[in-house]
Amino acid sequence: MQQKIIILDFGSQTTQLIGRRVRELNMYCEILPYNKFPTNDPEVIGVILSGSPFSVYDEQAFRLDMSPILGKYPVLGICYGAQYMAYTGGGNVEPAGSREYGRQQLTAIDKSCPLFNGFDDNSQVWMSHGDTITAIPTGAHVVASTPQVENAAYYIPDAGNGKPLFGVQFHPEVFHSVQGTLLLKNFVVDVCGGKQGWSAANYIETTVKELREQIGSDRVILGLSGGVDSSVCAVLLNRAIGDQLTCIFVDHGMLRKNEFSDVMKDYECLGLNVIGVDASDKFLGDLEGVTEPEKKRKIIGRDFVEVFNAEAKKIKDARWLAQGTIYPDRIESLNITGKVIKSHHNVGGLPEEMHLSLCEPLKWLFKDEVRRVGRELGMPEHLITRHPFPGPGLAVRILGAITREKVRVLQDADDIYIRGLRDYKVKLSGEEARSVLAAGVPANMENGEIEVSLYDQIWQAGAILLSEVRSVGVMGDERTYENPVALRAVTSTDAMTADWAHLPYDFLAQVSNDIINKVKGVNRVCYDISSKPPATIEWE
């Protein structure tokens, strides 16, 4: 039996972070909508209630029937989860005088409480809430405070049948809570009895066995993008079924510089059976004169399906379509009201007469876990650490109509930028170092520091060509009227929110100088310092 922790999602932006932290403890967990608790699952050993954007008093607040949980499992409520349990358990929740946000120090920590075993005095935590618990629930006692929040954490040793209940008004899942991982370990391992048996190696062994049983002797088709998810999916499937797998890699003409040939060489070295299709003429021809972003995406999506279908039909006796769908894709596909909010992850439009069944070997993994599986499979590091790249490619990074010349300009500028990020090394310590290491970047800690490239420090980067803007410049003794290029780099954990990366000035100066001097058609470089929200990561 595989033990699991259930995380009930009340709509918090950091719910996925809770899941990632639990998985980092080598414990399996699942994130489910707050009202979808699996009442008859014998593998469940504990429950975590997430935060929420709502107050417990809001009419639209999500309310949970606690009767299938209390007294049956240990429960940990985080922020809204703690407030909701207090509100429904005989305590009281009131609006705080001002929003309690940011770093705080825990005081009066009761270290006899199993949740705080091993904690340091004045441990730093992260607060983010507008309401506060003014009276704890019946039978509880306070086990930690902060200078501003008396009831920062409470504990009921026996909420029924000997099962404890804990509530914390801070967020242990975020990096700013320095001992947050220890708190989660205390809950998951010590309180719930988790065996910590979840690992990349175990996942590969189990999944290979399941794939062989699922697929048998059938043939499988996989659409490759060159990205982390589809590449790891391909290598994992190849280990399970070998030459029963056929991969299709379509070049729509808007990949990064030399990407098609480079990735094809990588796939060949990995022993994958890959059909490479250069369809750039078709895509660029159909995009001629098109400036509206959504229309660009629809044309590219339509053309991709047509090209992919044409190649897929040539593969006789195929019964399965494999996809590199990962767990966050599935979490984002349905929000907690049941409405689809994201649907672009899956390849759609295959002819119904092909009768292909869906195979998703990575569907339970977070992005950092996908990378760990890739390393365990022996994949090269440059494939594993690649940044996310939009499906439409550079089409959504060229503002305005797309031409081969504009693609060439942007490919050259982007290549200089990405190579620069890979070559520039930085030393990190403290929270920054812990964040990078938690994302799975291989680095050795020496004297409290790690050295990594800028590329590994950030989530996603790319150049954008403002092709409908002409910028005046001076080169030699002549005026120029050429295009500006904007550089974008963000830090994130799941791309749902992102902050602009604070790149060093000397790096930006060197990259700007290199692009302007080496890329014909560009005479100005800007750096985008917008966060998501209100902006998005991509410009279109």
Image: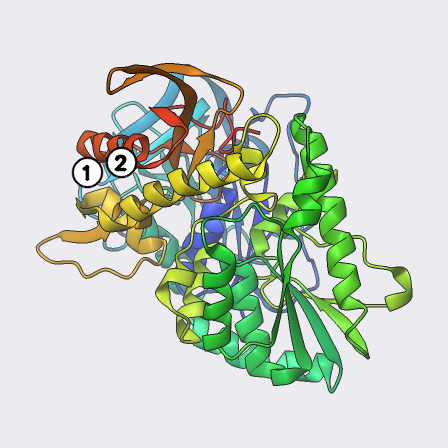
Q: Position of residue 166 (x, y in %)?
A: 44, 46
Q: Quadrant of the C terminus?
A: top right
Left or right relative to 73: residue 36: right
Mark 2 and mark 1 lie on one chain; the one further toward the N terminus is 1
Left or right relative to 12: residue 36: right
Residue in the image at 72% along x and 45% along y:
301
* Mark drawn on residue 122: 1
Q: Position of residue 496 (x, y in %)?
A: 52, 37
SS at mark 1 in the image: loop
Q: In the image, what residue type sits under mark 2?
A: Asp
Q: Characterize the local packing of mark 2: few (<14), some (14-19) or many (20 or more) Cα atoms within 10 angstroms.
A: some
Near-viewer residue (144 or 51): 51
Give the colour scheme shown. rainbow
Q: Position of residue 454 (x, y in %)?
A: 27, 45
Residue indicated by mark 2: 514
Near-viewer residue (76 or 260): 260
SS at mark 2 in the image: helix
> Picture quarter containing residue 58?
top right
